[in-house]
Amino acid sequence: MNKLPFVTKEQIEGIVKTYPTPFHIYDEHGIRENVKALKEAFSWNKGYKEFFAVKATPNPFLINILREYGCGCDCSSYTELMLSGAMGVQGEDIMFSSNNTPAQEFVLAQKLGAVINLDDITHIDYLEKALGCLPKTISCRFNPGGYFSLGTDIMDNPGDAKYGFTESQMFEGFRLLKEKGVERFGIHAFLASNTVTNEYYPTLARQLFELAVRLEKETGAKIAFINLSGGIGIPYRPEQEPNDIRVIGREVHRAYQEILEPAGMGDVAIYTELGRFMMGPYGHLVTQAIHLKHTYKEYVGVDACAVDLMRPAMYGAYHHITVLGKEDEPCGCLYDVTGSLCENNDKFAIDRKLPQVDIGDYLVIHDTGAHGYAMGYNYNGKLKSAELLLKEDGSVQLIRRAETPMDYFATFDCFDIYEKLAAMDGLEKEGDGERTQKGRVQ
Ligand code: LLP
């Protein structure tokens, strides 16, 4: 299958006049169509809610689009809670699914009225001490151990994951929480990541629904919601078949009817905490070829680097690349597409077949809308790129400016770079805020 970008060469040539590469650009139309389809797929469940995993794309302009469709926020840290609070997301619209959690994060979650999803049985006491008392509603994260498999395919290895309560701890934890006055309970599990199959959620749902029935029966705890968390994947590779969210919703419904309803639990709300599925395909990293290098291999050097998208360097993850304007040309050249970090793994692609690339060509790196910009860092003193929103009317909005050197140096309270540069002839203007407002200094 030909994987085409949501922008054309002509559009990008217009955009770079105002916002130089590299930048992440997001497709408002795609985000909206996808969230509508998700809501529709789970409309059979009265309490259904998607809590967008803020860690995937922590940008208020993008999250606000999802808010229009009733989505809440899944937060995992202090700053994600702050961001959600500042966007007016409060109370049970926030799911706080953290792990190894510091006390002050629980305190902020409580202040915002978030639902707290505990990662460990020892956190019951820790939370009680941190807050002075326990909230009336609590969720617990379950980890069944072993491997999570679909048929003969091993999808992931929960037994090796640091997250969650064991099965016996779920029972013990629910009893303890109930004794301590908790009234409403939730169950959460995230057992496999980036699953490109319609079977992940339905299989997980069956496991959790069966557990929920036993937990309610044996502990008397009232289960209000079951959180299937994230994990629905996207087709990063052109040959992959995308998930069909309607089939996923229908099969989760079937499990619900077969397990929960007969147990008198037909009022349980289904929650999801999707990140990648909500945003991944609707983001591109747009970058320009600035060097061609011919040594033992052929290299295309681009003006983005792993700071803008870490997944290929970190996981060897595949991200499809389109050379804009050459969509229909044969992929007759074999390239490594590299960034400029002093790290040999700073490669967006290795041995990738592409059309012949010329200096100045714009490359679209696909599927960067989730766990893309968000995972960036500042190694080699590289600065993070801007984020742009391609709106439904075709206009472009800057939704996060590129970092400037001033941002990079901002934490040096005890070493004023700018004062020192000002004392040196001709350097006082280096990297000042205004010049770099639109793009970033290379
Ligand atoms: N909920 C919790 C508690 C999570 O930890 C995550 C992701 C999600 C929801 C959203 O998962 P998603 O739907 O996006 O799969 N950096 C990795 C992904 C790490 C996922 C971490 N947790 C990557 O780039 O593939």
Image (cartoon, helix red, strand yellow):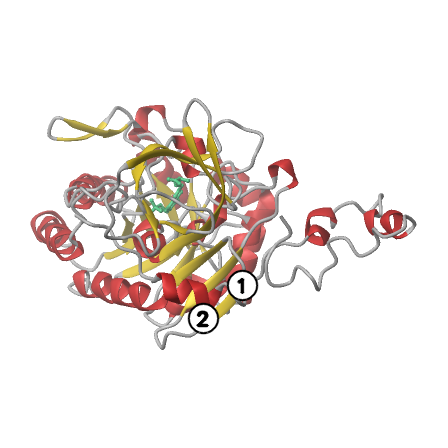
Residue 396 badge: 2
| Local SS, label 1 | loop
Q: Position of residue 249 (x, y in %)?
A: 16, 55
Q: Position of residue 179 (x, y in %)?
A: 40, 44
| Local SS, label 2 | strand
Report whether 108 appears left or right of 409.
Answer: left
Residue nearest the viewer, comparing 17 with 260: 17
**Residue contact at pointers 2 and 1, CB within 8 angstroms:** yes
The amino acid on which the numbered mark 2 sits, given as a three-letter code, is Val
| Picture quadrant where residue 356 is located | top left
In the picture of the structure, the residue carrying the numbered disc 1 is 19
User: Quadrant location of ligand 1?
Assistant: top left
Residue nearest the viewer, comparing 146 with 391: 391
Report whether 366 appears left or right of 127.
Answer: left
Between the residue at mark 2 and the residue at mark 1, the CA separation in whole angstroms equals 10 Å
Residue nearest the viewer, comparing 101 with 212: 101
Residue at the (11%, 55%) spot, across then down: 250
| Picture quadrant where residue 103 is located | top right
Residue 243 is at least partly visible in this image: yes
Mark 2 / mark 1, whichever is N-terminal = 1
The amino acid on which the numbered mark 1 sits, given as a three-letter code, is Tyr
Q: Which one is closest to the eye, mark 2 or mark 1?
A: 1
Can you name the residue that lies furthest to the bottom here? 393
Residue nearest the viewer, comparing 395 with 102: 395
Q: Is mark 1 within 8 Å of ligand 1?
A: no
Q: Position of residue 213 (x, y in %)?
A: 18, 44
Q: Position of residue 262 (x, y in %)?
A: 8, 51
Can you name the residue that lies furthest to the right here? 423
Query: How many residues crowd around disc 2 within 10 Å: few (fewer than 14), some, or many (20 or more)?
Result: some
Report whether 258 appears left or right of 116.
Answer: left
